Image (tube, helix red, strand yellow):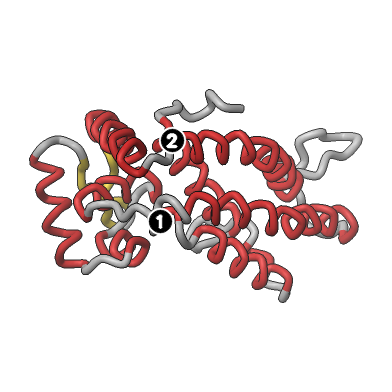
């Protein structure tokens, strides 16, 4: 059975939920939609109070509102039943949780390296062995993360791409471009991981922080 393909208007509502503060072009690129169509659908959603446009520090983008989050989850629940994928997504979420804990620890260790004087000392990345342990963990998670993503993408097309984006970021890290671990302005390992987690939570209607 081919994967379930989400409706364009559902994807455009879902985009600001998983991407955060997102431009129409970024939403379009993520879901392979024409930017003009995305802009039109965002305006429709804005009229219903589901998304809002804001500008900050010279950048503009769209965010989902609380009303929009409720509508988004309602639509995703219907989609799950139509695709017959609820059990698959629930099981994938359960398998993802231990991976997420390992990833969270790794990211914390990338940002913080405790010292005797300061247990919350900023990691200045001068300790090669410390950083190497973090990078080994990120690499070790790649295969398992791909397994979870691929199972979901086989049933719901919108989950396609997460594993490839993570692997691409990891390859850049391994080539020496360490900002691809967690830089917020690119598709870094951390960015992709957080977006995937948010996608899972939205799909199952689980509040963020309730599955830790």
* Residue 102 relative to residue 206: left or right: right
* Residue 168 relative to residue 13: left or right: right
Q: Is residue 161 above or below residue 85?
A: below
Q: How far apart are marks 2 and 1 (CA)?
A: 15 Å
Q: Nearer the viewer, residue 178 or 105?
A: 105
Q: Which residue is drawn at 72% across and 55% down?
A: 138
Q: Which residue is drawn at 29% across and 52% down?
A: 6
Q: Assign a secondary structure to mark 1.
A: loop
Q: Assign a secondary structure to mark 2.
A: helix
Crowd tier of the residue under label 2, counting other residues whose Cα lies within 10 Å: few below 14, some 14–19, many 20 or above: some
- For the question of whether residue 113 can be seen, the reply is yes
Q: Name the residue under label 1.
A: 1
Where is residue 98, by image quadrant? top right
- For the question of whether residue 55 can be seen, the reply is no
Q: In this view, does 20 lie above or below 74?
A: below
Q: Name the residue under label 2.
A: 86
Where is residue 94, by image quadrant? top right
Give percent across and percent down for residue 114. Answer: 83, 39
Q: Which residue is drawn at 44% across and 43% down?
A: 199
Give percent across and percent down for residue 48. Answer: 11, 37
Specify which label sits upstream in the sequence, 2 or 1. 1
Assign the N terminus to one quadrant of the image: bottom left
Q: Which of 23 and 32 is in front in this view?
A: 32
């Amino acid at each position: 059975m081919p994967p379930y393909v989400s409706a364009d208007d559902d994807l455009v509502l879902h985009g600001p939920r998983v991407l955060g503060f997102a431009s129409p072009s970024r939403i379009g690129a993520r879901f392979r939609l024409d930017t003009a169509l995305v802009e039109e659908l965002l305006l429709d959603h804005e009229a219903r109070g589901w998304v809002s446009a804001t500008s900050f520090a010279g950048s503009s983008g769209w965010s989902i509102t609380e009303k929009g989050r409720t509508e988004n989850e309602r639509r995703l629940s219907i989609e799950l039943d139509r695709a017959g994928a609820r059990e698959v997504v629930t099981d994938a979420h359960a398998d993802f949780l231990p991976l997420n804990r390992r990833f969270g620890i790794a990211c914390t260790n990338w940002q913080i390296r405790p010292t005797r004087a300061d247990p919350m000392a900023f990691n200045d990345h001068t300790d090669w062995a410390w950083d190497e342990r973090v990078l080994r963990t990120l690499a070790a998670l790649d295969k398992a993360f791909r397994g979870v993503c691929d199972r979901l993408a086989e049933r719901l097309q919108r989950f396609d791409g997460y594993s490839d984006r993570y692997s691409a970021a990891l390859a850049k890290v391994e080539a020496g471009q360490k900002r691809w671990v967690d830089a917020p302005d690119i598709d870094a390992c951390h960015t992709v991981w957080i977006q995937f987690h948010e996608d899972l939570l939205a799909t199952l209607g689980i509040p963020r922080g309730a599955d830790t």
